[in-house]
Image (cartoon, helix red, strand yellow):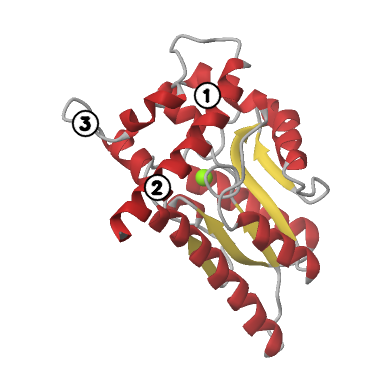
């Protein structure tokens, strides 16, 4: 019985994910690979022919346990803020990464299977990624409690307009700092260097310390100006160094 319920839930999750893929990818100007059709859902399961980490991770990401893990991390962050408020701790910036932290890009990986720079750019220009589980509730909580927060993404400035459009579609504010990479970026080469530079810049400009970081990559949480609390969301699909 339990197993049947689990399978039903998994299929519902997969259907929801893939129906949005079909809609979004149709709008892409470049279509070298046909989008998955709904009737192909079971093919997302790893096969003997394709046991690549990305494929296995993508399948895993649709399991209910993964969604629960995401929500648990965000709930722990909420509890941390509440506790800090109750003891009068000084609360500064909460800095959130975007991809796979707030914006769910699995539709891209289902359709194209791997990171391909030109296709990835096309995908980002759609500005239509759904929200990562737990993220909208967390940001709503921050706003209700007047906690300052900012987005810090490795996306380029050229993708700012579509990124802001995506945030607006999700009902998220775009008047908060949305920090992105310049189109030509030569300073720090690693994600850690880039993110710490922007976090320290945010502190210097605002006079408010970074207090909490949330990201799906270890590189989101390392380096200077990283605050008191760092929360890592699971990402079984890919790793950024
Ligand atoms: Mg990310």
Asked if residue 241 shows in the view, the reply is no
Reading the chain from its start, which is encountered first: label 1 or label 3? Answer: 3
- Disc 3 target residue: 47
**Which-is-in-front pick, marks 2 and 1?**
2
**Ligand 1 has an atom within 8 Å of the beta carbon of the residue at disc 1:** no
Discs 2, 3 touching: Cβ within 8 Å: no
- The image position of residue 112, as x and y in percent, is 43, 22
Mark before the other along the chain sequence, 2 or 1: 2
Q: Marks 1 and 3, Cα distance to the nearest angstrom?
A: 25 Å
- Give the quadrant of the N terminus: bottom left
Location of the C terminus by quadrant is top left
Position in image of residue 173 (x %, y %): 79, 49
Per the rendering, the mark at residue 38 is none
> In the drawing, does residue 133 fall left or right of residue 93?
left
Q: Position of residue 3 (x, y in %)?
A: 29, 55
Q: Residue furthest left?
A: 48
Spatial CA distance of label 2 from label 1 is 31 Å
Between 7 and 172, the one lying in front of the other is: 7
Q: Which mark is residue 8?
A: 2
- Give the CA distance from mark 2 to mark 3: 20 Å
Residue annotated with mark 1? 120
Report the residue at 60% width, 23% height from top. 23
Q: Nearer the viewer, residue 59 or 139?
A: 59
What element does badge 2 sit on?
Answer: helix
Category of crowding for the residue at label 3, using alpha-carbon neighbours closer than 10 angstroms: few (below 14), some (14–19), many (at least 20): few
- Against 12, residue 128 (above or below) is above
Q: Is residue 146 left or right of residue 62?
A: right
Q: Nearer the viewer, mark 2 or mark 3?
A: 2
Q: Is mark 2 within 8 Å of ligand 1?
A: no
Helix, strand or loop at disc 3?
A: loop
Please give the name of the residue rendered at 61% of the width and 36% of the height, measured from the top-left corner.
129
């Amino acid at each position: 019985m339990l197993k049947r319920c689990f399978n039903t839930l998994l299929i519902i999750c997969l259907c929801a994910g893939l129906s949005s893929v079909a809609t979004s990818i149709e709008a892409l100007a470049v279509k070298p690979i046909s989008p998955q059709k709904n009737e192909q859902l079971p093919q997302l399961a790893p096969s003997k022919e394709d046991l690549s980490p990305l494929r296995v991770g993508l399948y895993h990401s649709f399991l209910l346990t993964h969604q629960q893990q995401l929500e648990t991390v965000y709930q722990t962050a909420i509890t941390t803020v509440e506790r800090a408020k109750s003891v009068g701790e000084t609360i500064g910036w909460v800095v959130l990464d975007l991809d796979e932290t707030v914006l769910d890009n699995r539709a891209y990986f289902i359709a194209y299977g791997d990171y391909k720079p030109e296709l990835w750019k096309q995908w980002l220009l759609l500005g239509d990624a759904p929200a990562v589980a737990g993220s909208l509730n967390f940001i709503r909580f921050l706003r209700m409690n007047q906690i300052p927060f900012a987005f810090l993404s490795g996306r380029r400035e050229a993708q700012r307009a579509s990124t802001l459009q995506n945030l607006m579609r999700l009902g998220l504010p775009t008047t908060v700092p949305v920090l992105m990479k310049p189109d030509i970026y030569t300073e720090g080469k690693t994600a850690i260097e880039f993110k710490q530079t922007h976090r320290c810049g945010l502190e210097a400009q605002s006079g408010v310390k970074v207090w909490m970081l949330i990201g799906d990559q270890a590189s989101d949480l390392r380096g200077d100006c990283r605050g008191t609390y760092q929360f890592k969301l699971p990402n079984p699909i890919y790793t950024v160094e």
